[in-house]
Amino acid sequence: MILALIEHDRGEVNPASLELLTFGRKLAGSMGTSLHALVIAGPKSLAEEAAAYGAEVVHMAAHEQLEDYAPEAWARTLTQLMDAEKPEVVMAAGTDRGNEVLAHTAAMKDLPLATNCTEVRVGEAFEVTRVRWGGSLLEDARLLGEPRLLTLAPFSTAAERLPDPPEPTLRSFAPTLSERDLRVRMKERLPIRTEGVSLTDAPVVVSGGRGVGSAEGFAVLEELAGLLGGAVGASRVATNNGWRPHADQVGQTGSKVAPELYIACGISGAIQHWVGCKNSKHILVINTDPEAPIVAKADYAVIGDLHEVLPAVCAEIRRRRGT
Amino acid sequence: MNILVCVKRVPETGARIVLTEDGQRIDTRYLGFTVSPHEECAVEEAVRQIEKHGGQSTVLTLGPPEAVEQLRAAMSIGIDSAILLETDGEEWPPMPTAEAIVEAIRQQAEAGNTFDLLLFGNESADAGGYQVGVRVAQALDLPCVTGIKALEIRDGVAVVRREAGGFWEVFEVPLPAVLTIKEGINVPRYPSLPGRLRAKKKPVLEIKVGTRAGGLQKIRLRTPEEEASQVQILGEGPEAAPKVVDLLEELGLIPS
Ligand SMILES: Cc1cc2nc3c(=O)[nH]c(=O)nc-3n(C[C@H](O)[C@H](O)[C@H](O)COP(=O)(O)OP(=O)(O)OC[C@H]3O[C@@H](n4cnc5c(N)ncnc54)[C@H](O)[C@@H]3O)c2cc1C
């Protein structure tokens, strides 16, 4: 049996868990086994959702002290269900929470863990392909352990809803939790205030790097983003120099964005930046250097100084609009 | 306050990753080395907490002899001493890495050096295993919070925040504790020249560690297939502006 941990935030399923179920259903098919899901402290609607994406059995774990997310308590619950059900594979989505719960699970059970896998091949050995460097490099590896523990890289599998979802088989599960398992619990949850459109939701992201030259230099990027209803992003050079807050950073250690159009201004295209913007539908580069690596990777490029090109673009938009 | 920060030496890859012929590692002949931005921020955070609360800090790495460069870099911005768990240069999987770090922490405790706070990066820059800090916490039976972007220590309690889907999640954990840090918690300072000179004289404890296999065994590395360039050059300089706006209109991105 393959056991998939369903991630949810106060009852709302994380889309990465639906990708996980789709992946798990196919893996179960190739291994000739079944797919089970585990929902911790969640409503019954989650079980229906899990079934719609391929879970044959859904274990509903509940405990009076388990309301909000608590990493060790989730891991303890998972290990106890593993003891009871003896799955061959245990997996979660490669999200912050999924990786965290599986890391605790692996440590509690003294098992290896392969995070952010994109593929699994089951033959004589259990082989995985996983991502490194935020997605710029792939690693083929053998994974040992009983059960095999892994997380699935988000966006590596497209979620597929079953055309005719069956009624899920529900099983309730009551974990035994100690005070120790509950020692790390969320105390409060505060909304993060953002002005305007958020980086990850914006249809257009106008990003600036070293070529912008200063904090003030970003004014023209702000202006273009404003005209297009978009957001401003930045490379690490820009955030490290204090020109922009880290919240604006795109890349391996910043945000991953996928807008309709990503406009990279004065950014060279280091792999750690590229992994954050490569999923954009279209990429336009403005760079003085035609040999900058990002030029060859982009869809469109203007070779020139961003401080001359961007004001001209803003003026042209205004002219056509007649404002 | 006594703080330990753990970092990992990684190549400073540029726009492309070049692998050695056998696909076992990155060809680093022409590359410099660094640590993950998450770890740079963890080092900076340790220095700031000591500046605020007093005490001492140690930086630790498991890596080849050359990794002393990354230890000196951390000491040049204010970390007091270093521990090098010296390998023969082969990359270690996360499980044995955590075990070796736990052993080193226990040895330090036996020698009277107990840490109140253990800081890690949220995930390493290269392997991205997301687990060494958590494994160390479990082995030492310490509370652990990952992905930290704000830390305040009050009366032996760490009040920490992490980001999750448009919210700050706030946790409070008693010390000693393990925290894994994300970039954005601070903006690391640059080392000063006197800082660099001082770092050369700070103590580095070297401990040799034998090779250890783990249950995640690398077979080979591969670079994802690159698509052939399809770039369309719209023009040069400000004269290209009309072409750019044509494109914006074509993509339906100009609000009316
Ligand atoms: C583990 C790790 C994680 C990292 N994570 C991230 C991350 O999340 N995000 C990130 O961005 N980086 C990250 N980096 C850093 C990354 O490797 C690069 O150093 C960084 O992205 C370079 O930023 P840049 O393109 O702005 O600067 P540069 O590489 O210096 O490029 C500047 C570009 O601007 C052009 N230019 C200069 N002047 C002008 C002008 N007037 N008009 C137009 N163009 C001009 C130049 O031709 C050049 O191409 C990470 C590094 C490591 C090791």
Image: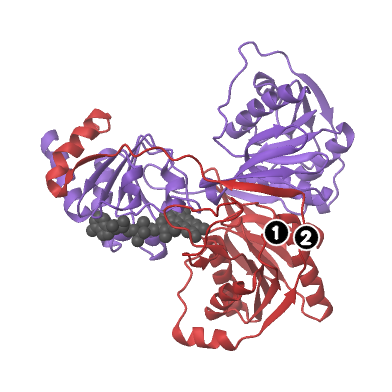
Q: Amino acid at mark 1?
A: Trp
| Residue for point 61% across, 56% down | B122
Q: Amino acid at mark 2?
A: Arg
Badge 2 is on which residue?
A: B212
Q: Secondary structure at mark 1?
A: loop
How was the colour assigned to the protein in this rendering? by chain
Q: Is residue A288 left or right of residue A93?
A: left
| Residue for point 81% across, 81% down | B112
**Residue B161 drawn at (x, y percent):** 59, 56
Picture disc at residue B92: 1
Chain depicted in red: B
Q: Colour of chain A?
A: purple
**Residue B164 drawn at (x, y percent):** 57, 46
Quadrant of the picture in which ligand 1 is shown: bottom left
Q: Is residue B105 left or right of residue B196?
A: right
Crowding around mark 2 (Cα neighbors within 10 Å: few <14, some 14 to 19, many 20+) is some
Kindly check if marks 1 and 2 are in contact, taking CB atoms under 8 A apart as contact: yes
Of callouts 1 and 2, the N-terminal one: 1
Same chain, marks 1 and 2? yes
